[in-house]
Amino acid sequence: QVQLEESGGGLVQAGGSLRLSCTASGSIFSFSVMGWYRQAPGKQRELVAAITSSGSIDYADAVKGRFTIARDNAKNTVSLQMNSLKPEDTAVYYCNAVGFSSFEDWRHWIPDFNSWGQGTQVTVSS
């Protein structure tokens, strides 16, 4: 079972920056997706950014141009650099990792694991 540990949340003023990091323990398969989600009070959890093991990246429209996701496959880490933060970015941010045993399982989205971190609070003051 893959376990995820996040770090880097905190309080920052609007316009500031934060960097979130997530380290996965255990085996991250060759076919995998690692990403960041966030959940604000009273709202559903939403995708912020995701990156595949081959380097394909997807961002939520709300963060494009401000956030950058990066991944180190050798170290099983994923990071999220957040710049130009806005009060509406305030949320608990969760690291996620989904792994597949084969490309066919990937194609049909049949994961071997789907792990979540404990969450880290990001608060942006106006």
Image (tube, rainbow, N blue to C red):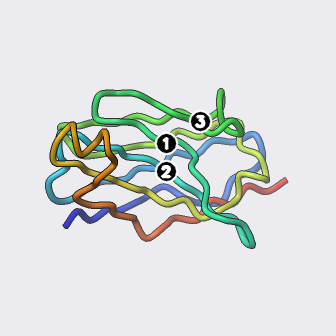
- Front-lying residue, 122 or 4: 4
Q: Please report whichever mark, 1 or 2, sits nearer to the chain's N-terminal start.
A: 2
Q: Residue at x 75, y 50 (%)?
A: 13
Q: Residue at x 43, y 70 (%)?
A: 118
Question: Hey, what amino acid is under mark 2?
Answer: Trp
Residue that label 1 marks: 80
Residue contact between numbered discs 1 and 2, judged by CB atoms under 8 Å: yes
Place of residue 52 in the rendered image (x, y in percent of width and height, measured from the top left): 35, 36
* Within-10-Å neighbours for mark 3: few <14, some 14–19, many 20+: many
Report how far apart the C-alphas of labels 3 and 2 lie in the structure: 11 Å
The total number of labels drawn is 3
Report how far apart the C-alphas of labels 3 and 1 lie in the structure: 7 Å
Report how far apart the C-alphas of labels 1 and 2 lie in the structure: 8 Å
Place of residue 44 in the rendered image (x, y in percent of width and height, measured from the top left): 66, 65
Question: Hey, what amino acid is under mark 3?
Answer: Phe
Q: Secondary structure at mark 2?
A: strand
Q: Residue at x 69, y 42 (%)?
A: 16
Q: Please report whichever mark, 3 or 2, sits nearer to the chain's N-terminal start.
A: 2
* Within-10-Å neighbours for mark 1: few <14, some 14–19, many 20+: many
Q: Secondary structure at mark 3?
A: strand
Place of residue 86 in the rendered image (x, y in percent of width and height, measured from the top left): 77, 46
- Front-lying residue, 78 or 7: 78
Q: Give the mark toward the camera: 3 or 2.
A: 2
Residue that label 3 marks: 67
* Within-10-Å neighbours for mark 2: few <14, some 14–19, many 20+: many
Find the residue positioned furthest to the right: 126
Q: Residue at x 43, y 58 (%)?
A: 7
Residue that label 2 marks: 36
Residue contact between numbered discs 3 and 1, judged by CB atoms under 8 Å: yes
Left-right relation of 33 to 30: right
- Front-lying residue, 101 or 57: 101
**Displayed quadrant of residue 121:** bottom right
